[in-house]
Image: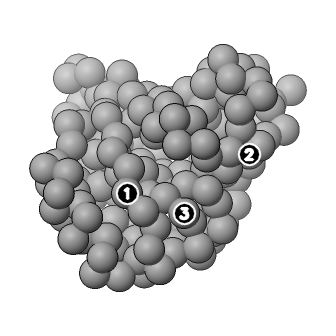
Amino acid sequence: MHDPRISVILGDITTVAADAIANAANTSLLGGGGVDGAIHRAAGPELLAECRTLHGCETGKAKITKGYHLPAKYVLHTPGPIWRGGGQGEAALLAGCYRSCLELALSHGCRTVAFPSISTGVYHFPLELASAIAVKTVADVLREHPEDFDWVCFVCFDPHTKSAYDRALASAP
């Protein structure tokens, strides 16, 4: 039975009212395409201005900014790994993205967190593997912090991605 605090929805992460949403950023943190571009557009120019002060972020780590015009109070920026065949530590780096975001959320008092599918777009991380890593890592962190989070949601932009996360959640211990 999976943790009831973890859910999967089909939708647009920029519209989710959470304490924090994660951004599948690039290492510059200065905006890009996909989820990153959508978050920057929805948050407004203040987000880019704050991101410029952060001087980038390593792959698998996370940095936090205000949410500005988003319904979320904070944005957790995490550069996911580019898929290079699986032999370059990609799985550990992707797990690090989710863990770093949740640790940062915890340190800022965030009890609700929404994630996109990190690295499965232009970074080509295989979706089935990425969703399994995401669900396992989030479940592990929630077990380590049983009282600290109310919910964590995976917000999937399309039905294909949602199906992969639904399967990962259904098979989670």
Q: Residues within 10 Å of mark 2 (few under 14, many from 20)?
A: some
- Residue at figure coordinates x 66%, y 68% from the top left: 17
Disc 2 vs disc 3: which is toward the camera?
Answer: 3
Against 154, residue 47 (above or below) is below
Helix, strand, or loop for circle 1? strand
The reply to whether the C-beta atoms of the residues labelled 1 and 3 are less than 8 Å apart is no
- Counting every numbered tag in the picture gives 3
Against 48, residue 107 (above or below) is above
- Image quarter of the C terminus: top right
Q: Position of residue 66 (x, y in %)?
A: 42, 62
Quadrant hosting residue 91: top left
Disc 1 vs disc 2: which is toward the camera?
Answer: 1
Q: Which mark is residue 97?
A: none
- Residue at figure coordinates x 86%, y 26% from the top left: 1
Q: Which mark is residue 65?
A: 1
Q: Which sits in the foreground, 85 or 12?
A: 12
- Residue at figure coordinates x 38%, y 50% from the top left: 64
Helix, strand, or loop for circle 3? loop
Q: Amino acid at mark 1?
A: Thr
List the residue tagged with mark 2: 151
Against 56, residue 4 (above or below) is above
Who comes first in sequence, dot 2 or dot 3?
Answer: 3
| Residue 46 visible in this rendered orientation of the protein | yes
Q: Which mark is residue 73?
A: 3
Q: Residues within 10 Å of mark 3 (few under 14, many from 20)?
A: some
Q: Residues within 10 Å of mark 1 (few under 14, many from 20)?
A: some
Q: Amino acid at mark 2?
A: Trp
**Cα gap from disc 1 to disc 3, whole angstroms:** 9 Å
- Residue at figure coordinates x 67%, y 50% from the top left: 112
Q: Position of residue 24 (x, y in %)?
A: 36, 54
Q: Position of residue 117 (x, y in %)?
A: 48, 51
Q: Which sits in the foreground, 125 or 40?
A: 40
